[in-house]
Amino acid sequence: MRVGFDKELEKLERDVLRMGSIVEEAVVKAIRALANQDLALADEVIANDREVDLLEIQIEEKCIALLALQCPLGRDLRLIGTTLKITTDLERVGDNAVNIMEVVKRIGHEPLIKPLIDIPRMANLAEKMLKDSLDAFVRRDATLAEQVRLRDDEVDEIYVGLYDELMGYVFPGGEEYKVRQAINLLFISYYLERIADHATNIAERVVYLVTGQAVSHPKARAAGRPSRS
Amino acid sequence: MAKVRTLRSALVWAFMVTAAASGGLLFWLGSAGRPWPWGFSLLLLLSSLAGAAGYLIAEEFARPLRQLVASARELGRGRFGKMVWADSGGEVGELVDAFNAMAVYLERTVQELAETNRKLEAILTSMENGVIVVGRNLEVLRLNPAACRLFELPEEAVKGKGSVIQLIRNYEVADAFAETLETGTPVVRELQILTPVERSLRIHITPIRSEQGEVEGAVGVLSDISDLRRLERIRADFVANVSHELRTPLTSLKGYAETLLDGALDDPPTARRFLEVIQQEADRMARLISDLLDLTHLEARGQTIVKSPVRIEEVVENSLRVVRPAAEKKGIRLEVDLPSDLPVLWANADMLEQVLINLLDNAVKYTPEGGEVKVAVRAGRGVMHISVADTGIGIPREHLGRLFERFYRVDRARSRSLGGTGLGLAIVKHIVERHGGSVGVESAVGRGSTFTVTLPLKD
């Protein structure tokens, strides 16, 4: 019975990582579609998100079945709880990739109002955070998970800077397409910031999984969103 | 030892004699009917003697057995080459012989296995293809260094721990392995990995079956086909480019010919102009085709180029003669800077001339009227530098890297209006590289460009 349970847990973890790998790929493709204004790739990312949604439901059902039938304790219980949370975050990351693709499609082949520098930088940071948070999960590496959490501040900082910069294009009498594109780019940076947040969440779950200690939510999280009028 | 053996045998005999004697004594005492105290003591003495002899005999059996046990333990620990003394006869002796034979056989088998393992290990390690071996539950049993490199995994991953998706977080790879294990049939996939580096991979997975035919695992062989895919793309681009380049003059040939037939033929001045255009376009096509053939010849590897001692002064003189009419027409000064003591260069003179003509032709084309084109030659340590500098329009920095690619043009329309084929610099680069040299360019927009060819004096 217990051997069967261990197998089930292994399989559950494989499923989460499979989902993680699909989401990672979606993010990498989204960044590429954004950089190259590649609308076909954007459509591909949007279409692939369905599988992520299905996986989330499947994994959730599996977790609940294991909780109900096996009454797991200790580490096993933490693993299942963590899995439930991580899949939610992964699914959201997938959604954010889709959101970015929708904006990319709205921008289309319009000439960009400014060369993209900070957005790709932010995108790469967020992607690396997602990768590292999943690596930390695989290796049960609380130290790496902590590092991922710290890196969130950097993303937040870029986001605040971008917010100020892009808002500079939005003023009465500004060229219409520029205003529109500035707002679109603002959306993209917001979604990227969200991806970094979800990666941070995953990292926090890993810390919990390994140490059994819940991570308190740092103030930095709230400060990340610009609260201006 | 031999002495001990004789002593032992003597004692065995002594035991037998004593046993017989004590038996006789007992019989005699028994028949006499009354026990004698001294006779009883004698009996005691004899039986203790018998006991001692019995111990020695037991020892005789036990010693080789104990050695067997010790040797078996050694074997178990993998230490071979320890024989048991085969000095016993009878059943124990046979056992010892059998044990020794087994030890020899085991040692040989283990050595053979180790040898096979070493060979397999060497093959796996030196293979250029990635190899991933998984067990029944998708757990990674082996990864060779090539597989680690493909996914940029740390070396300790070679030991293999965790499942495929844990080590290589790529669901397509993991899915392909899962499919092989599930269906028990080989799976071949071509996939694009994006991280850590974008690569095209072909993965070929074969199930491993036990003697009973059950699927016990799978072996995946990964080959990096990125180069292949890139070459295919380059070839497709090339074909598309050539077709395009050929169609352009062809379209105007067709257009002018049709117009002539539709009535322009009756208007001699117009007809003449049209025919001139037709001739120009035909010339351009002829140039393009001859350039393409040149490139094809240059790219045909294996064909060695014939070199002979070349006086660079002559080559420069010959090439200048070719471009002089065009230069004079535009009022461009042609300058030459040749030191007097230049060494002899081993090269193919015709090819070298083509390099210079192509560079000079470009220089004259892209230099406005009244400008200057200068050829300079300098000898370096074992090499010769030949440079062609102009005071032309220059090349924007972003184009410099791709300038020597076939059909790459900074300004498509302008190049064509000047009669370029888009292949001149590609030919230059190929010839120079076939000579073991290199070509570079420096340029400033509006000030001019300098192309420098560096060739080794000898191979």
Image (cartoon, coloured by chain):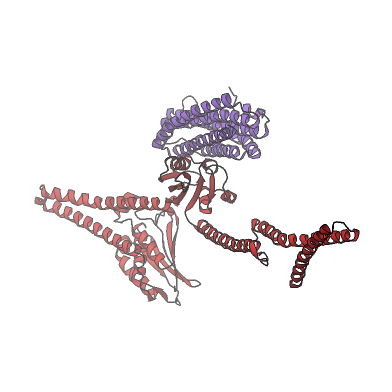
Chain colours: A purple, B red
* Residue B20 in picture, x, y percent from top left: 77, 63
Q: Tell whether A107 sits left or right of B48.
A: left
Q: Is residue B54 above or below residue A167?
A: below
Which one is in front, B44 or B202? Answer: B44
Which residue appears farthest toward the front when viewing the image? B32
Q: In this view, does B414 lie above or below B360?
A: above
Which one is in front, B33 or A73? Answer: B33
Which one is in front, B141 or B75? Answer: B75
Q: Tell whether A162 sits left or right of B427.
A: right
Q: Is residue A164 visible?
A: no
Q: In this view, does B59 lie above or below B270?
A: below
Q: Tell whether B156 sits left or right of B343.
A: right
Which one is in front, A141 or B389? Answer: A141
Q: Can residue A106 be seen in this view?
A: yes
Q: In which quadrant of the rendered view does residue B458 lie?
A: bottom left
Q: Residue sitting at 74 percent across and 72 percent down?
A: B2
* Residue A213 in picture, x, y percent from top left: 68, 30
Q: Tell whether B60 sits left or right of B392.
A: right
Q: Quadrant of the N terminus of chain B?
A: bottom right
Q: In which quarter of the image is the C terminus of chain B?
A: bottom left
Count of marks, rendered view: 0
* Residue B91 in picture, x, y percent from top left: 64, 61
Q: Residue sitting at 19 percent across and 54 percent down?
A: B278
* Residue B215 in picture, x, y percent from top left: 46, 44
